[in-house]
Each structure stands twice: as C-alpha cells, then as structure tokens.
Image: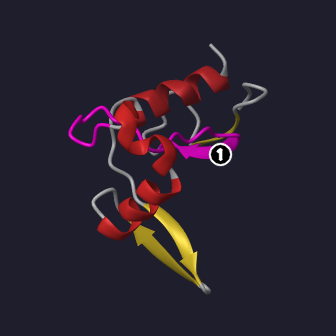
Amino acid sequence: MSKYDDAIKIMNGRFGKDSLISIATVDGTHPSVRSENNAVIMEKLRKAFASWYSNGHVNEDDPNTCLLCVRLKDGVITDHEKKYGEWQYRVDFAKQTA
C-alpha cells in the first residue's frame, strides 16, 4: 500500500460523507467566513446561476443538493494517530502521490 493510498484512507474516514464546511472569502484584508445557511451568499448564488438555478436544476429542499464541488490539486493531511505510520502526508492528487 502506498503513502498516497494511506492518505486517501484517512481522508475518506474523515471526509467521506456529507460534511458542513465554511468557505472563507476575503473582504478587504480580512477573511469573511460564510456557511451554507448564509442568506446573503445564497442570494448571490441564485443570481449568479439564475439562467438554470430555478428551472429544475436545483432543489434547495433536497439534502443531497450540492452547490459547490471542490477539486483538490494538492494538500497536506495530518494524522495525529499515525494509523499508517506517518504523521503528515503531502498529497499531489494529480500525480496520485504522497
């Protein structure tokens, strides 16, 4: 088993389910954290995607609706328990290496 496979196992255990996350934007020089329940950001999304948002492509009542899909290029995952021997994995998702 490769270090990349180990890192993916850790990530799947931690994030392989629906997870509420906050997205940070920048307002001037200060981070501005938004959650999915933020009415202001939802209104911006509705306007930005107005051409298809309300014509059957988005059902806000469906808990499986995904308005944002993040595709990772690289990152660092920390495993404080050292399940697979490593403490940190520097992951390159494009090359599938760690």
Residue 68 is a magenta residue: yes
Q: Which residue sits at x=46%, y=59%?
A: 47
Region in magenta: 59-79
Q: Quadrant of the C terminus?
A: top right
Q: Which residue sits at x=62%, y=13%?
A: 1
Eyeballing the image, is 11 above or below 20?
above
Q: Which residue sits at x=47%, y=40%?
A: 52
Which residue is farthest right? 95
Residue behind mark 1: 75
Question: Which x, y percent locates residue 37?
Answer: 27, 60
Q: Is residue 75 left or right of residue 6?
A: right
Color theme of the render:
secondary structure
Residue 56, quarter of the rendered image:
top left
Question: Which x, y percent locates residue 9?
Answer: 49, 24
Amino acid residing under circle 1: Gly
Residue 16, quarter of the rendered image:
top left
Residue 1 is a magenta residue: no
Q: Is residue 38 left or right of residue 32?
A: left
Question: Which x, y percent locates residue 74?
Answer: 70, 42
